[in-house]
Amino acid sequence: MRVGIGITSYNRPECLKECLEHIYKHTFMDNVTFYVATDTDEDRKGVAYRKNECLRALKDCDYVFLFDDDCFPIKDGWVDFLDR
């Protein structure tokens, strides 16, 4: 089972860092693929475009979770339903 985690961000490196730290801390799985889609001042395509970018990049995964850089898991077991 391959799990993909896509994160969208826009000019908030500290939020992105905290998001990644929380995901790493609370995710105990093998075979997880991460993709970060960042909007820039020069290339402002918007959050919907970046979410779709994540989905395209993670299309070979069995399950895909999409996060914004200010949203993240806060406790272990957030992906436990995948074992059912």
Image (tube, rainbow, N blue to C red):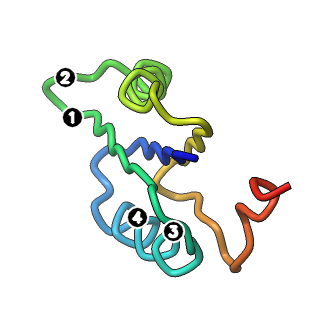
Q: Is residue 58 above or below residue 10?
A: above
Distance between the alpha carbons at the discs numbered 4 and 3: 12 Å
The secondary element bearing badge 1 is classed as: loop
Residue labelled with disc 4: 15
Dot 3, crowdedness within 10 Å: few (<14), some or many (≥20)? some
Q: Amino acid at mark 3?
A: Ile
| Circle 3/circle 2 CB separation < 8 Å | no
Residue positioned 54% across, 67% down in the render: 29
Q: Amino acid at mark 2?
A: Asp
Q: Earlier in the sequence, mark 2 or mark 4?
A: 4
Q: Is residue 25 above or below residue 36?
A: below
Residue 59 x, y percent position in the rendering: 46, 25
Residue in the foreground of this view, choosing between 25 and 32: 32
Residue 70 x, y percent position in the rendering: 52, 58
* Quadrant of the snapshot with the C terminus: bottom right
Q: Amino acid at mark 4?
A: Cys
Dot 1, crowdedness within 10 Å: few (<14), some or many (≥20)? few
The numbered mark at residue 43 is 2
Number of numbered tags placed on the structure image:
4
